[in-house]
Image: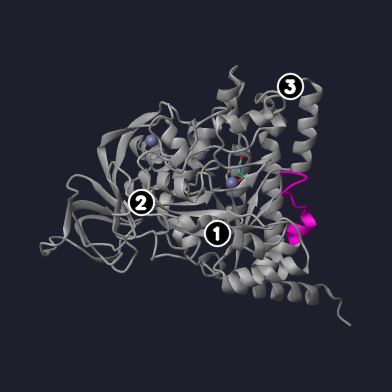
Amino acid sequence: AISESHLLQGVCGLEYDPTLSSTSGKILVKGGTVVNALHKEVADVYIQDGVIASVRPNIIVSDDVTILDATGKYVMPGGIDPHTHLSMEFMGTETIDDFFTGQAAALAGGTTMNIDFVIPVNGNLSAGFESYMNKAKNSVMDYGFHMAVTRWDETVSEDMEVMVKEKGINSFKFFMAYKGSLMINDELLLQALKRCKTLGALAMVHAENGDAVAEGQRKMIALGITGPEGHALSRPPMLEGEATARAIRLASFVNTPLYVVHVMSIDATEEIAKAKMSGQKVIGEPVVSGLVLDDSWLWDPDFTTAAKYVMSPPLRKSGHDRALQAALSTGILQLVGTDHCTFNSTQKTLGIDDFRKIPNGLNGIEERMHLVWDVLVESGQISVTDYVRITSTECARIFNIYPRKGAILEGSDADLIILNPNASFKISAASHHSRSDTNVYEGMTGKGKVEVTISGGRIVWDGELKVIPGSGKYIKMPPFGYLFDGIEKADSADLSTLRSSNTRSRPAT
Ligand code: URP
Ligand code: ZN
Ligand code: ZN
Ligand code: ZN
């Protein structure tokens, strides 16, 4: 149950305590197994002034250093969630978690950075950026931004350059769905892909065929299907597969890297795998809900229960979940996000008579690290090092902030967690830190527990949250990340093939 103080203050125990020190002390994490994406070893980690000062066995320190014993536990880079929506105005309402409550929840679950999506204001990117910088003022952990592009003109094109060169944005998201609001057409997508390439910014797509979704929705309503199950029935996996394939082809035509967000189906995964085999640079991001849930919930006779599972692309039939896990563990998909986009049960009732009006989105920012550990590491599908790669390091590399983020190395930011593999977690709305009154993972339990989270060199979670509003920093992300390596060479190779094939086919005179 949610208490009144949750509603007033946001999160239990989260009222700002002014006695908390914002200066980061000195911490020694002793005797744990330090895990990076490619290597693990037993070592101590010494933290000073918000950065990792030293990583080696048997570090001796003075009396003023806080010592945390991590013997028998894993010391890992804090999670980076590449896909969240905090304080997002969407479908006639605004997500219940803002940067304060959403990030506090993240820290309690071992995530120390999120990358959120700036939504332009009336299509204007600069206004959108200012608006989101303002929304993020109460941040309690570091964060970065992607930016959605929802219309196309000279101003948008010029603003993209300003965002990349001055504001620290290196990725733009294009919605191929949500017809009538955020959706863009192929003409815009093509222009934007070209612009992204020039700027060294990564193009991201929400891949569903929005026109066909609108048609599917009309069909369901005509059949008298107005409940949450209509959401799944109106936008089947083939529409995700089609849009994924189309975005991949257009990105290939332009020769620019592509990042497919919230991959939910086998259909989309197969398109990504196929593109990879042809040598194309495509990144696929499943989200934790897609890995552990299926669409059966949408048929629950209780509207409140069913509606909390409405997100887009929708949860799929059982089988897609396990295929996504397999694709992630074998490298077809690269990293895992959440698409944390929470609406409480009251907000979800906006669609009580019509599933098309149920605000799309569900939680995960606090649960991702635990669920991925349990479902992939505990089950034996991936190694502990791969866990670090898919929850943190790969995200830092793709968005060009590695090794400041995503690593436990000398000089990296002191964002890290201590995970006890022998303790267990239990998920419930009664104990979570989101402002929502529901949780889509309600009742789930598993092995592996984040016992300590250190953010910016401070202990912010040790069973209790110790967060300071405004302490989170905006992390600028520079363009031309590793996915752009070789793009120019491939272009000139293409060009010379084109020229030589033309000359060869010309008849001799
Ligand atoms: O249902 C979802 N995914 N809501 C958030 C917006 C988006 O498409 O990412
Ligand atoms: Zn609480
Ligand atoms: Zn989306
Ligand atoms: Zn999203």
Please state if 58 lies on the left or on the right of 507 as rendered.
Answer: left
Front position in the image: 499 or 39: 39
Magenta residues? 178-190
Front position in the image: 282 or 34: 34
Mark 2 = which residue? Answer: 467
Residue 34 position in % (x across, y down): 25, 54
Task: State whether the magenta stretch is mostly helix, strand or loop.
Answer: loop
Which label is found at residue 225? 3
How many angstroms separate mark 2 from mark 1 (CA)? 19 Å
Residue 467 position in % (x across, y down): 35, 51
| Extreme-top residue of the structure | 301
Q: Element type at marker 2? A: loop
Residue 383 position in % (x across, y down): 34, 45
Mark 1 = which residue? Answer: 134
Q: Element type at marker 1? A: helix
Q: How many C-alpha atoms fall within 10 Å of the one at disc 1: few (<14), some, or many (≥20)?
A: few
Amino acid at circle 1: Asn
